[in-house]
Image: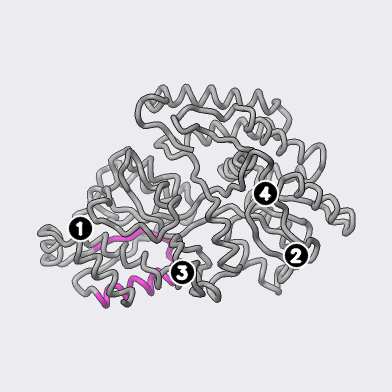
Amino acid sequence: MRPTVLATVAFMACCTVACRNELQQGTVITFPGSAVGAEADVLRRQLTRFMADHPEITVVQRTTPDAADQRHQLYVQWLNAGADDPDILQLDIIWTAEFAAAGWLLPLDSFAPDLASFFPVTVAANRWEGKLYALPWFVDVGMLYWRTDLLDHPPLSFAELARQATEARTRTGLPFGFVWQGARYEGLVTVFLEHLGGFGGHIFDDTGRVVVAATPAVRALTYMRDSIYRSGVVPQAALTWQEEQTRFAFQNGQAVFMRNWPYAAALLHDRAESQVAGKFAVAPLPASPGGSSTAALGGSQLAINANSDYPHAAYAVIAYLLQPEQMRERAQFVGQYPPRVTLYQDNALTDALAVPPEQVRRVIERAIPRPITPVYAELSEILQIRLHRALTRQQEPADALADAARAMRELLDKVGLASGTGNEPRH
């Protein structure tokens, strides 16, 4: 069955009397997003095809900033004012719980979406209080980039990574062993989350208690600090770096390993700009005994404005965009990873992604979300400050994490989300 037919079936399945009334009136659906680049071009093509198949629905794109913080601010202004426009929202994965708890998103369970083919973690990250509020559009995951011209295999443990990096630097004179995002911003939290899981730790336990100051977390943060000042595997300069600075260091052939998001792969393959084109691969991040390989989950989700006048038509657009054929097209032209596990089980993505699909699947299977909570932004700010203090040796790791845990508990208690309220953050 063709993807356009599948989308139509999904659309018609949700068509109650209200849905039919929408179509009788003639429907305009608004969809915010970027207006430039390959991502915008693909979206325009897909929406044009959708409208050709559904002439009763017109989709109008609303230009929004590409910067996540600016887009978030704009959404908050619109939704807090009770606006019914835009109908569809493109959300960062850490916004879903915040917007759902505010009453700004329409629950999607009544549309009965087929979730079986998605990676389970990508669905779980979009639930709040047991309800589904968004569907995954594409996936971002933290992954390890490694130099295939210098190493025979990627490391399985952090100790092996340090050994391989040191040996490769000794042989080649490379300035850096492992580069990651250490500036005081959201990227640092994702890097810490991956080390944290690798040492067997968590930010919250299964009951919602804050456990970020427990022994595994202290070991993880201590390892990160010691990688800078004791082994020298990670450069001190990384404490001011975000994604692009780490990419440039790896791309210029200066590092053995890099932690980064999928977007970097296509750029590293550009032989006109990259000194490591054809000389790298990706792998899951390593883990230590007692931990497990962990990838921070990112990506974009599609949701419906709770005040939309045309929720069924909006869902029809979403259902179309989430069909396998549309996801393959995005993978091919934008390099974004589909959240449907079934697409990695055949050869559909072999020519679409900058790295082998099997390598991608292995990383996504290790993904975990950041804490699923309406106050994630505030919790992240607390963590960013304390993590950076520890990594710049202003505080000992144990003290910094104890301060973070205390501040996080106070915040959760203040907003009524402390353990025992029934709305505990997860992960």
Front tag of 2 and 3? 2
**Secondary element at image label 3:** helix
Tell which of 91 and 17 is nearer to you: 17
Task: Indicate the amino acid at tag 1.
Answer: Tyr
Task: Indicate the amino acid at tag 2.
Answer: Thr
Left or right of 189, for residue 71: left
Front tag of 1 and 2? 2
**Secondary element at image label 1:** loop
Determine which residue is flagged by label 4: 286
Task: Indicate the amino acid at tag 4.
Answer: Pro
Q: CA distance from mark 2 to mark 3?
A: 27 Å
Q: Is residue 402 at all visible to an observer of this figure?
A: yes
| Marks 1 and 2 close (CB-CB < 8 Å) | no
**Secondary element at image label 4:** loop
Task: Indicate the amino acid at tag 3.
Answer: Arg
Q: Position of residue 239 (x, y in %)?
A: 70, 42
Image quarter of the N terminus: bottom left
Determine which residue is flagged by label 3: 330
Determine which residue is flagged by label 2: 148
Q: Residues within 10 Å of mark 4 (few under 14, many from 20)?
A: many
Q: CA distance from mark 4 to mark 3?
A: 29 Å
Tell which of 175 and 163 is nearer to you: 163
Q: CA distance from mark 1 to mark 2?
A: 51 Å
Front tag of 4 and 2? 4
Front tag of 4 and 3? 4
Q: Position of residue 113 (x, y in %)?
A: 29, 58
Q: Earlier in the sequence, mark 3 or mark 1?
A: 1
- Which contiguous range is marked in magenta? 29-53
Determine which residue is flagged by label 1: 310
